[in-house]
Image (cartoon, coloured by chain):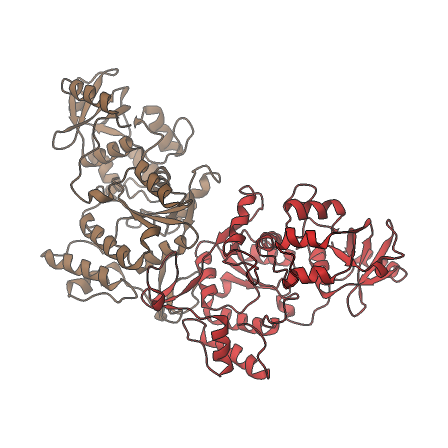
Chain colours: A red, B brown
Amino acid sequence: MTAGDDEREALRERAASLPAIRLSARTVSDLELLGNGGYSPLCGFMSRADYDSVVESMRLASGLPWPIPITLAVSDDESRGLKEGGEVALADEAGTVLAVLSLAERFTYDKRREAQAVYRTEEDAHPGVAAVYRQGEVLLSGPVRVIDLPPHDDYPAHRLTPAQTRAAFKERGWGTVVGFQTRNPVHRAHEYIQKCAMETVDGLLLHPLVGETKGDDIPADVRMRCYEVLLELYYPADRVLLSVNPAAMRYAGPREAIFHAIVRKNYGCTHFIVGRDHAGVGKYYGTYDAQRIFREFPDGELGITPMYFDHTFFCKRCAGMASAKTCPHEAADRVILSGTQVREMLKGGLLPPPEFTRPEVAEVLLKSMQERTTPRYAV
Amino acid sequence: MTAGDDEREALRERAASLPAIRLSARTVSDLELLGNGGYSPLCGFMSRADYDSVVESMRLASGLPWPIPITLAVSDDESRGLKEGGEVALADEAGTVLAVLSLAERFTYDKRREAQAVYRTEEDAHPGVAAVYRQGEVLLSGPVRVIDLPPHDDYPAHRLTPAQTRAAFKERGWGTVVGFQTRNPVHRAHEYIQKCAMETVDGLLLHPLVGETKGDDIPADVRMRCYEVLLELYYPADRVLLSVNPAAMRYAGPREAIFHAIVRKNYGCTHFIVGRDHAGVGKYYGTYDAQRIFREFPDGELGITPMYFDHTFFCKRCAGMASAKTCPHEAADRVILSGTQVREMLKGGLLPPPEFTRPEVAEVLLKSMQERTTPRYAV
């Protein structure tokens, strides 16, 4: 948790004389979510008992659901000299001290076991697995006191903490709120899914993930402009809140879907949208694995209701958006474009059809493509 | 409950020598639902204790939720000579004996109290209240053994009992099924609501009510043709089941919404759509009263999950269906027609726009209008 004002000063002074380690951008994201309550009930980086339990059974040692290890990995060199029972200053990549860790344990771990259990593969072609393989060999655990949440210059109006999103929902009188995770622009397929959900709940938290993603994802600033344009023109202002999730992507598919849901519960959502291939990458997970995994938790245990959606598209005969669950027509009636096709259109200066992307959103994408000499990301 | 084969023969013989009463079409509908399990856990017409409890607190004397009296009302004349503890043969309007009532109680009741509590008005301009005022002064209670479900010539393929709909859901592998109550043609607004719900559940039970309705509602046979055309052309066959609900309309608004939900639970639905003004008539109920009333039952008690929808329409700027919850545009962008406007169009031989009604459904309505010299019903 983040320290109060008095404690913060004391921590800052004390930290100056503590051994310090620099965290990767990924770990700074985790620190932010530990500090702002997004990772409740976690109070710090996981102990060996929690780590083992999470890897093996998707639960903390206490039995509470938690599917993804939240760990502080350091190299052997970095860990040398750190004492269990002592304190460690945690700094970002620029060297700014953000938090103090009360070092409870220092332990080694089996990366391949984590990869297999959490990511369902040991291949380093998987970006989440690669990140585990890249990180240090030693895990440090213990509660953290966050002095300052990591500083951000970008989209300060959309950097709400869980306490702030909850307060915003309350102020708007939303009894039910559906959370939507995304690391892509919102094309009409996702707008349709969000709106289907919105028809039966009070509000939508559009909660794009802006922590580290793989290099070919669209940059967060471009995505944010897309969201702003889309919400302004196509969503009622009193039914939607745009705020960012500072987490890094794991691409852990099913386990990450559970993780995304728990984090959104902490942000105040009552419902969470789980689409096809949620948080997946490559061919590592079955299309519906991220929906099926919710069955492993008894009804109500997660404290947030998943809403499952299928692949959606515009159908010319339906004269509207639909999915295979609601449209009986032929493939030829459906406007379906691959990411590659859309990228090619934009590269050629063409807007995707309005049945696929709202024209104003397409303009933002086209402009961002043209500003970069070589389009290098998926749309 | 409906008797087994052996019992049926014995009942039929015995009924021949019992005093018999003829039931109104409304009461025959109730008898059908008592016989086919649609009114589970009721085994017969309500006792005084159940009746009082239902009127006062929307619960049976046992405490189970039940919002609408299910009673057998007869005149003083008819009740004369019937003995508590004896049996009574129950016949339809044609005189065919359908069931045997074990007469437990015979009691008078306060129609105005029932009207006020159940319908929230004592005005006889309310069709549900008028039906109560029209019926007899004495209520007969007791379990019924149904010899034969009431015979029907119309749409036999769509006359599934609760056991049959449940079996159909199971056969199709539907774990979740949303029920849709209607006594109108399905225009695009309701198609959109159904499909929004279908996106997150496995299947839809389109369950039109075909028991007695007020005279200006569209005849059930015309509605059934509309449903068949619509489903054939716009719904995936493996995601929707069309079957009828033999119940009569009460127009009891909020209480009838709960009633409709409980009956659909008995038919095997896990979810039930509650729109604006559900089961309402005139200005007797607030727009959202039929949604709010569900809050009076603790979560999970009804055993079926309500899904609330707002008024929906085609919006030209959204280029799709939407509601005030999902569309930020002006009234001028929205295709909204009143029942009167649609009726006038059809009377003049015009089809309503495809944004309002699927053309193939509009054709059925137009044809049925033209077959009748004076269009006499709402659309």
Q: Residue at x 18, y 53 (%)?
A: B377
- Residue placed most toward the observer, B2 or B331: B2
Q: Where B89 falls versus A142 (above or below)?
A: above
- Residue placed most toward the observer, B8 or B322: B8
* Residue B359 locus on image (x, y percent): 24, 64
* Residue B153 locus on image (x, y percent): 15, 41
Q: Residue at x 28, y 58 (%)?
A: B187
Residue reaching furthest to the front: A123
Q: Is residue A237 left or right of residue A110?
A: left
* Residue B23 locus on image (x, y percent): 18, 31
Q: Residue at x 61, y 57 (%)?
A: A252
Number of marks present in the image shown: 0
Residue reaching furthest to the left: B373
Q: Is residue A344 left or right of residue B14?
A: right
Work out which quarter of the rendered image holds the N terminus of chain A and state it.
bottom right
- Residue placed most toward the observer, B255 or B360: B360
Q: In this orientation, does residue A365 appear?
A: yes
Q: Where B233 falls versus A347 (above or below)?
A: above
Q: Where A125 falls versus B303 (above or below)?
A: below
- Residue placed most toward the observer, A80 or B29: A80
Q: In this orientation, does residue A361 appear?
A: no
* Residue A286 locus on image (x, y percent): 52, 55
